[in-house]
Image (tube, coloured by chain):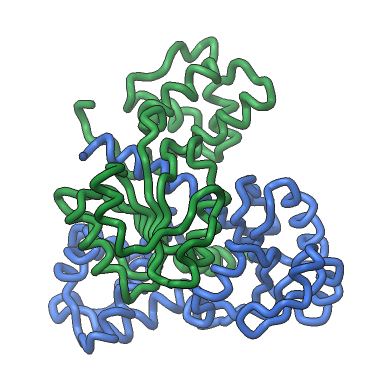
Chain colours: A blue, B green
């Protein structure tokens, strides 16, 4: 890609992907940018602009082919690459994430789960046995996972990220309250569930 | 407010709030828009523009007073109003949310938890006993909660939201995979954890 795609376009890509997935399940074959935009609360010109960032995806007059549009967006998102991921923290958030997200549909598969709590080590989450976090470096060396989901208490996050980075992990999905900063050699998605509460609070004040 | 504030400004407000909260803990009294912007990965002019949407918050030359800036942003977010919330679904996600989010700091307090699973009803999450979802209408009538956090399987969401709306709930934080659409009389925040995975996948392809 020549130009850097804006953050807001990147944020919309997963929504397009999810929506197209729903359309396929409903048996829809083609969709116009107008219909697609209405369903997503955007304008038709915004949808076309978004898609133009990636070369357009086919003729507008006839609408987009849903299946191939989904495939194209999936490729842009890198979902077709199926990277491997490990989960650090087998508490409520970690378990919820491991059990509820269909990783395969999102471009990742989960290969290991780690915790430092003796009560959790040895338990099974989904079809994976929770391992001792002390063994994480060995596991990374042998299995080369690319991504770590960090779902541990805030206090431990810096040390955990430091160890994982040194062991070769380059991408982090961070559920702790502490923000992990994007650095030159890693990519991070910080998930702040509390932010959603605050946004909702704002919208309530604005509207109801 | 005269003008509608843009979505991206609203999205940044919780981040400002969180960051200012950290600064207070560190004992910082004043901060310049330059320092604040650097810490948040924005430009100083973007920070000033964001704040100008709400009238500016004090003199730039001397920097912002951290404490009063946090208070002002908290008021805009409506955090000072302390609305009451109920949680529907005492599974992993619901429990994680109820136990890990400091509701009071986000403008809500949790007053009830509901589930339809006989094994979960009667259990305690934090200091709240899980009630039968069949009693939710009665609870809403008596306690008038304003918001519902919905953390149930996708299949049940339409019916649950329908019942809660009819009982008087006007704001929803939705953790299910199904998107609940914003309507005239309600506000919704849809949390799609899988989207974060896809965004991370995109960033990995772009950078590492």
Residue B8 visible, this orientation: no
Image spot of residue B82 (x, y percent): 39, 33
> Foreground residue, A206 or B172?
B172
Image spot of residue A115 (x, y percent): 75, 66
Q: Which quadrant of the structure image shows residue A76? A: bottom left
> Foreground residue, A135 or A172?
A135
* Total labels drawn: 0
Give the residue at x 43% y 28%: B74
Relative vertical location of residue A163 with respect to residue A54 in this rendering, above or below:
above
For the C terminus of chain A, the quadrant is: top left
Q: Residue furthest front?
A: B122
Horizontally, residue B110 falls left or right of residue B155, namely right
Horizontally, residue A147 falls left or right of residue B60, namely right
Image spot of residue A142 (x, y percent): 82, 81
Horizontally, residue A189 falls left or right of residue A26, namely right
Image spot of residue A7 (x, y percent): 44, 53
Relative vertical location of residue A115 with respect to residue A161 in this rendering, above or below:
below
Residue B142 visible, this orientation: yes
Give the residue at x 20% y 49%: B168
Relative vertical location of residue B147 with respect to residue A91 in this rendering, above or below:
above
């Amino acid at each position: 890609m020549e130009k850097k795609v804006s953050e807001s376009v990147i944020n919309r890509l997963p929504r397009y992907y999810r929506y197209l997935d729903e359309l396929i399940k409903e048996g829809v074959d083609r969709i116009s940018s107008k219909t697609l935009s209405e369903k997503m609360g955007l304008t038709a010109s915004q949808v076309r602009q978004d898609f133009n960032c990636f070369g357009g995806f086919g003729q507008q007059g006839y609408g987009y082919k849903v299946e191939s549009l989904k495939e194209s967006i999936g490729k842009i998102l890198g979902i077709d690459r199926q990277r491997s991921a490990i989960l650090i923290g087998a508490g409520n958030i970690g378990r919820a994430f491991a059990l509820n997200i269909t990783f395969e549909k999102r471009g990742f598969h989960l290969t290991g789960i780690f915790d430092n709590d003796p009560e959790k080590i040895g338990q099974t989450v989904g079809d994976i046995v929770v391992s001792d976090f002390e063994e994480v470096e060995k596991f990374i060396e042998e299995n080369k996972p690319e991504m770590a989901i960090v779902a541990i208490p805030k206090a431990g996050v810096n040390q955990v990220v430091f160890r994982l980075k040194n062991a070769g992990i380059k991408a982090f999905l961070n559920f702790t309250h502490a923000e992990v900063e994007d650095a030159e050699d890693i990519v991070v998605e910080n998930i702040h569930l509390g932010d959603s509460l605050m946004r909702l609070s704002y919208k309530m004040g604005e509207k109801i």
